[in-house]
Image: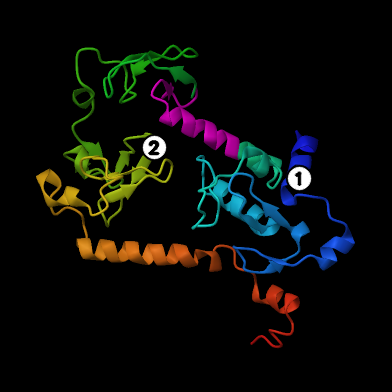
């Protein structure tokens, strides 16, 4: 794959193979990440959305996404990309190391299993086999048998199979804390699973509106209600979660405004060029750095 991936990387960098003379005459292109002007041979155009960035910035962006545990498709780093592009695996493979690409593939595979209602992981720590799950009604537990260690467990709570009792009844009524104290109800526990991908999430304090880092699902911490489309957080106006948001709605909306403004300007901060590098590239614009 090495030679094929490298060839593909070269073809996506420029539409043609320009000669050194052509590059000298070609206009410089501004990278949307570092805002530096680069020649075309140092730029990379994404296949899906055709956004263009300098190769060094794009490589660092991919490396950062993988190090943060991103198993979801890596999106175009342009926050205002009109085509909402995602990076192809071939593009990722030719810009990161072999180890990083293998890590990305593993994270992607784990995410696919988490999101697949017909597959699940064996809960035995030393096994971790992907087990098939029989079709059932949404949220209805079914018996799963691991094909490797033959453990029989519940598809919902991953506990030993409990045919006659519900998942809640099969679980302990109290949950231990790191200090030995016990939580009377699950709602008080600081760690829960994302309702979609089942990844464990810890909440120390703050807003009750949670976003899963793995699958980007937004939900209520207390009742796990889907909040993906509840822009104004009306969920906290009534019902058992009323007034449990943790912040005033005005402060939340203000925070969202700040986030939007940050996203518009994030290109200035995501992968900033060092001042030393700028001074070398543009000595006439930066005659002296203090």
Label ID, residue 288: none
Q: What range of the chain is rendered magenta?
A: 104-127
- Relative to 159, does residue 22 appear above or below in the rendering? below
Q: Is residue 22 visible?
A: yes
**Corner quadrant of residue 201:** top left
Q: Nearer the viewer, mark 1 or mark 2?
A: 1
Residue 171 rendering spot, x and y as whole percentages: 23, 27
Q: Mark 1 falls on what kind of element?
A: helix
The number of callouts visible is: 2
Q: Residues within 10 Å of mark 1 (few under 14, many from 20)?
A: some
Colouring mode (rainbow / by chain / secondary structure / one colour): rainbow
Label ID, residue 11: 1
User: Magenta stretch containing residue 75, yes or no?
Assistant: no
Location of the C terminus (image quadrant): bottom right
> Residue, x 71% and y 44% (percent of image)?
94
Residue 41 rendering spot, x and y as whole percentages: 78, 57
> Residue, x 60% and y 50% (percent of image)?
62
Task: Mark 1 or mark 2: name the one nearer the start of the chain.
Answer: 1
Location of the N terminus (image quadrant): top right
- Relative to 137, does residue 111 appear above or below in the rendering? below
Residue 71 rendering spot, x and y as whole percentages: 51, 40
Q: Residues within 10 Å of mark 2 (few under 14, many from 20)?
A: some
Q: Mark 2 falls on what kind of element?
A: loop
C-alpha gap between disc 1 and disc 2:
38 Å
Query: Quick one: 36 or 248, which is closer to the camera?
Result: 36
Query: Quick one: 180 or 12, which is closer to the camera?
Result: 12
User: Magenta stretch containing residue 109, yes or no?
Assistant: yes
> Residue, x 61% and y 40% (percent of image)?
88
- Relative to 205, does residue 278 appear above or below in the rendering? below
Report whether 284 appears left or right of 113.
right
Label ID, residue 199: 2
């Amino acid at each position: 794959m090495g030679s094929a991936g490298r060839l593909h990387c070269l073809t996506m960098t420029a539409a043609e193979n320009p000669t050194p003379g052509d590059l000298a005459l070609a206009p410089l292109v501004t990278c949307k990440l570092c805002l530096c002007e680069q020649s075309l041979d140092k730029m990379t155009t994404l296949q899906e959305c055709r956004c263009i960035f300098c190769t060094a910035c794009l490589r660092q962006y991919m490396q950062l996404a993988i190090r943060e545990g991103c198993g979801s498709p890596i999106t175009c780093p342009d926050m205002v990309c009109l085509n909402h592009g995602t990076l192809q695996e071939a593009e990722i493979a030719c810009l990161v190391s072999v180890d990083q690409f293998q890590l990305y593939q593993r994270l992607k595979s784990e995410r696919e299993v988490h999101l697949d209602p017909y597959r699940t992981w064996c809960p035995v720590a030393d096994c971790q086999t992907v087990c098939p799950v029989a079709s059932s009604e949404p949220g209805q537990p079914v018996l799963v048998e691991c094909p490797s260690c033959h453990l029989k467990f519940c598809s919902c709570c991953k506990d030993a199979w409990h045919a006659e009792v519900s998942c809640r009844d099969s679980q302990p009524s109290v949950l231990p804390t790191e200090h030995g104290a016990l939580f009377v109800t699950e709602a008080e526990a600081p760690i829960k699973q994302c309702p979609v991908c089942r990844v464990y999430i810890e909440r120390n304090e703050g807003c009750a509106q949670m976003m899963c880092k793995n699958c980007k699902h937004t939900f209520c911490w207390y009742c796990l209600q889907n909040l993906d489309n509840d822009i104004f957080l009306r969920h906290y106006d009534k019902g058992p979660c009323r007034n449990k948001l943790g912040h005033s709605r005005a402060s939340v909306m203000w925070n969202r405004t700040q986030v939007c403004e940050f996203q518009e300007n994030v290109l200035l901060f995501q992968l900033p060029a060092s001042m030393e590098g700028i001074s070398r590239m543009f000595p006439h614009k930066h005659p002296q750095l203090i």
